[in-house]
Image (tube, rainbow, N blue to C red):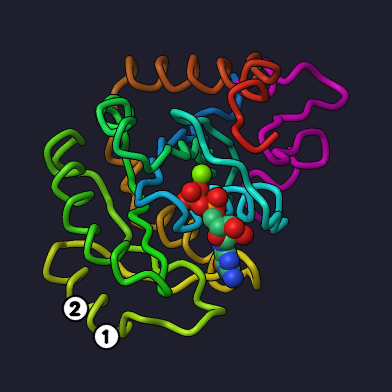
Amino acid sequence: MSRNEGSDKRHSVIGNRIRSGETESAKFYSSSFENLFKVKVVVVGDVGVGKTCLATRFVKGTFEPAYELTIGAGFLCKAVELPDYTIIFQIWDTAGQERYRSLVSMYLRDAKAALLVYDVTDLNSYINVSEWLKQLRTYSPEDIKIILVAAKCDLSSAVHPTTANEYATKNEMLFMETSSKTGLNIDKLFTTLASIMNVRREADTDSELDQKKKNVLDITNSDSHTKQQCCSS
Ligand SMILES: Nc1nc2c(ncn2[C@@H]2O[C@H](COP(=O)(O)OP(=O)(O)O)[C@@H](O)[C@H]2O)c(=O)[nH]1
Ligand SMILES: [Mg+2]
């Protein structure tokens, strides 16, 4: 039985909502926040590569093909439970258009992880990966974890996965083939991210724990705000 299992009967994280049951969620989290970590993930890549579908597929478990263009950025939250701790992913789904590039760099500043997405049917979106990587390396923290994500793998590919995998390795990224339509590797993408995050090492001091507690409570209290920001709702 995992450490959090007993508590899950009263509280569960569903989509962008942290639900509380018999007791107030603040009380619950103040007793168990040591095992709860918030990780900001930024999703970048050209417009139309499937960023919004990917975030939505992971958080809501659905594929809604006719997405509107993302304006600026919006975020969704979902928890991933590992044996010893739980990570709450705050997933920032950004707009891929050129005019939002400077805005994207703002979101990168305190990102702990990034998903750099290209569309396997669109060679141009793969060619542009190097531009996105440049932006990531310029504006995000040095120790950011990046996964190169091949999206729409249910369709025939214009980019050989071996080529993309080699590029990823050379540039210190992981590589994963996904499909938001079929669900291929969507959960695995985030459990992989969770397993490489080094959250324990980052939260050693009391002040960091205090900040983390505050962050968790912020999420707990900001459900309506979160909903407004979600591009897909
Ligand atoms: N076949 C297929 N189409 C997808 C997939 N993911 C997204 N799409 C389609 O690609 C288009 C753009 O997706 P969207 O998530 O809005 O791209 P974004 O601009 O990067 O956020 C939409 O028409 C989606 O239906 C996928 O995994 N498979
Ligand atoms: Mg979008």
Report whether the residue tagged 2 is closer than 8 Å to ligand 1: no
Work out whether 118 lies above or below 4: below
**Residue 49 drawn at (x, y percent):** 44, 58
Q: Could you tell me if residue 82 is visible in this image?
A: no
Check residue 162 in the rendering and tell me which mark sits there, or answer none: 1
- Residue that appears at 31% across and 26% down: 103
Label 1 crowd bin: few (<14), some (14–19), many (20+), radius 10 Å: few
- Residue that appears at 76% across and 34% down: 11
Label 1 SS: helix
Is residue 66 inside the magenta stretch? Answer: no
Disc tally is: 2
**Residue 78 drawn at (x, y percent):** 60, 42
Q: What amino acid does circle 1 point to?
A: Thr
Q: Which range is magenta?
A: 1-29
Where the C terminus falls, by quadrant?
top right
| Left or right: 117, with 33 as reference point | left
Residue ID for mark 2? 166
Report whether the residue tagged 1 is closer than 8 Å to ligand 1: no
Is residue 19 inside the magenta stretch? Answer: yes
For the residues labelled 1 and 2, say whether their Cβ atoms are less than 8 Å apart: yes
Q: Could you tell me if residue 159 is visible in this image?
A: yes
- Residue that appears at 49% across and 59% down: 191
